[in-house]
Image (cartoon, rainbow, N blue to C red):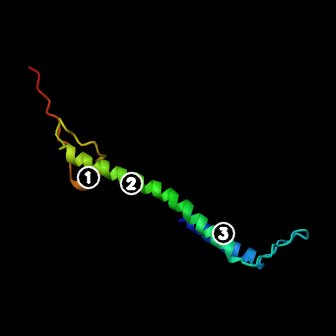
Amino acid sequence: NLFSHVFALLGVLAFFFFTGRIEIPNPTFQAPTLNYYWLPILTLVVGSYMIAHGFFSVYNMCVDTLFLCFLEDLERNDGSAEKPYYMPSSLMKILNKKNKPVKSKEKK
């Protein structure tokens, strides 16, 4: 959410800077004159999208991998002492699954 606000603010500032509506109070600085001021803005938007898409693709792959491991745990294990579930207790709670307690043999 914070990143979307930063990118939106950066886009608005780039628009006002390149259209000449924001002036920098330095007498030696001259604002660049652009024939196509939408090009830097479009480059910024496309570049930001590509970077965000790359990061979220990695995140999506991690979530898919965790989901597949969770399903594999359900398929291979039954919660008994011989085949306990290896998933976190929070996932077991969502599915109403429990590892069966280990029966201890009484010593005589």
Q: Disc 3 vs disc 1: which is toward the camera?
A: 3
Is 35 displayed left or right of 25 in the figure? Answer: left
Q: Helix, strand, or loop for circle 3?
A: helix
Q: How many marks?
A: 3
> Which sits in the foreground, 15 or 26?
15
Q: Residue shown at 28%/42% (left/top)?
A: 86
Name the disc covering residue 93, or none. 1
* 30 shown above or below 72: below
**Spatial separation of the CA atoms under disc 3 and disc 2:** 30 Å
Tell me where residue 87 appears, x and y as whole percent.
Answer: 29, 45
The answer to which image quadrant residue 13 occupies is bottom right
Neighbor class of circle 2 (other Cα within 10 Å; few <14, some 14-19, many 20+) is few
> Which sits in the foreground, 30 or 80?
30
Q: Earlier in the sequence, mark 3 or mark 1?
A: 3
Neighbor class of circle 3 (other Cα within 10 Å; few <14, some 14-19, many 20+) is some
**Spatial separation of the CA atoms under disc 3 and disc 1:** 44 Å
Pointer 2 residue: 63
Disc 2 to disc 1: CB gap under 8 Å: no
Q: Is residue 9 visible?
A: no
Is 105 displayed left or right of 3 in the figure? Answer: left
